Image (cartoon, rainbow, N blue to C red):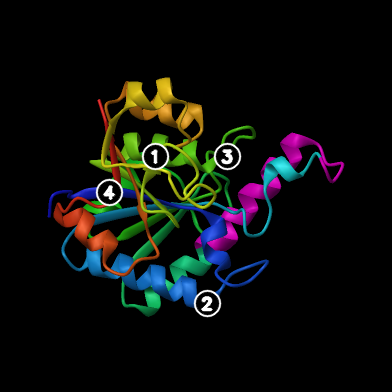
């Protein structure tokens, strides 16, 4: 395997599948199966998942809710998704640990960096929930920071598109996909890869990012094996 320790970032919206709200069991099963293929190859896997299929902190203002409180609601949404993913992974026979940036010890462990690394070293799959535990930070930022903290080789951003384009491929049929692109080029072209805080964290720590289609079977395994899948962002 090209990568020995990865941080996989999944969006909450990806779990919607064909539903308008909540979790589609088919999508949950698909992701658990794809992650299992990689874990069985000995790759150490950590996962950060969003909560947009349930509640987004940015929607709080429209609902008349204080932004900070709305962000905490969003963090709880990520924990709901993380618990669901943990259950699906354990049904696949994987040993998992759910670690939260907010203390809910009846449900999961508090995040402790050394403990997280030790879990990975023992072959356990680690899911990080509740973002960073602070409002105004996205789960993209959580993915970047956790990846740096655990010494991951790469951040893999699983989406429903197969990479980074110069325009929205779902709206512009002439959009061009990049196979490789530098951090500086992303800045100059104003491309939407991650939020700026998350993206800058990766750049400053020279941590590569790969954006790829998580919904295509075997894409994750091919990528971790070293095949060119999606778009690679490097220095």
Find residue 155 and report its image quarter: top left
Residue under pointer 2: 25
Badge 1: residue crowd in 10 Å (few <14, some 14–19, many ≥20)? many
Please indicate whether residue 18 sits to the left or right of residue 35 in the image: right
Secondary element under disc 4, as helix, strand or loop, is strand
**Which comes before the other along the chain, label 2 or label 1?**
2
Q: Magenta region's main secondary structure?
A: helix
**Which comes before the other along the chain, label 1 or label 3?**
3
Residue 98 location, x and y as percent? 45, 58
Which dot marks residue 133?
Answer: 3
Single out the mark in the foreground, 2 or 1.
2
Instruction: Determine the residue positioned at 41% across, 34% down.
Output: 145
Does 65 lie within the magenta span? yes
Instruction: Determine the residue positioned at 37% across, 57% down.
Output: 213
Secondary element under disc 2, as helix, strand or loop, is helix
Single out the mark in the foreground, 3 or 4.
4
The residues tagged by marks 1 and 3 sit, at their Cα atoms, a distance apart of: 12 Å
Badge 2: residue crowd in 10 Å (few <14, some 14–19, many ≥20)? some
Instruction: Determine the residue positioned at 59% across, 70% down.
Output: 23
**Which comes before the other along the chain, label 2 or label 3?**
2
Whether residue 232 appears in this view of the structure is yes
Badge 4: residue crowd in 10 Å (few <14, some 14–19, many ≥20)? many
Instruction: Determine the residue positioned at 64% across, 35% down.
Output: 135
Quadrant containing the C terminus is: top left
Residue 5 location, x and y as percent? 23, 48
The residues tagged by marks 3 and 4 sit, at their Cα atoms, a distance apart of: 22 Å
Residue under pointer 1: 146
Single out the mark in the foreground, 4 or 1.
4
Residue 99 location, x and y as percent? 46, 52
């Amino acid at each position: 395997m090209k990568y020995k320790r990865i941080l996989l970032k999944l969006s909450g919206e990806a779990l919607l599948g064909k539903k308008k709200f909540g979790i589609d069991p088919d999508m949950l099963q698909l992701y658990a199966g794809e992650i299992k293929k990689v874990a069985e190859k000995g790759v150490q896997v950590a996962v950060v998942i969003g909560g947009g299929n349930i509640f987004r902190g940015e929607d709080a203002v429209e609902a008349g809710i204080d932004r900070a409180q709305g962000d905490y609601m969003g963090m709880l949404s990520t924990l709901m998704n993380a618990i669901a993913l943990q259950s699906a992974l354990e049904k696949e026979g994987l040993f998992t640990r759910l670690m939260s940036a907010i203390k809910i010890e009846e449900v999961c462990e508090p995040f402790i960096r050394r403990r997280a690394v030790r879990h990975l070293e023992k072959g356990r799959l680690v899911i990080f929930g509740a973002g960073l535990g602070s409002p105004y930070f996205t789960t993209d930022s959580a993915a970047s920071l956790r990846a740096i903290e655990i010494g991951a080789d790469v951040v893999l951003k699983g989406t429903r598109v197969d990479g980074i384009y110069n325009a929205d491929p779902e709206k512009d049929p002439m959009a061009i996909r990049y196979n490789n692109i530098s951090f500086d080029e992303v800045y100059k072209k104003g491309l939407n890869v991650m939020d700026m805080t998350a993206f800058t964290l990766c750049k400053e720590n020279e941590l590569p990012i790969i954006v790829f289609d998580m919904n295509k079977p075997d894409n994750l395994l091919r990528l971790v094996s070293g095949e060119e899948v999606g778009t690679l962002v490097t220095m």
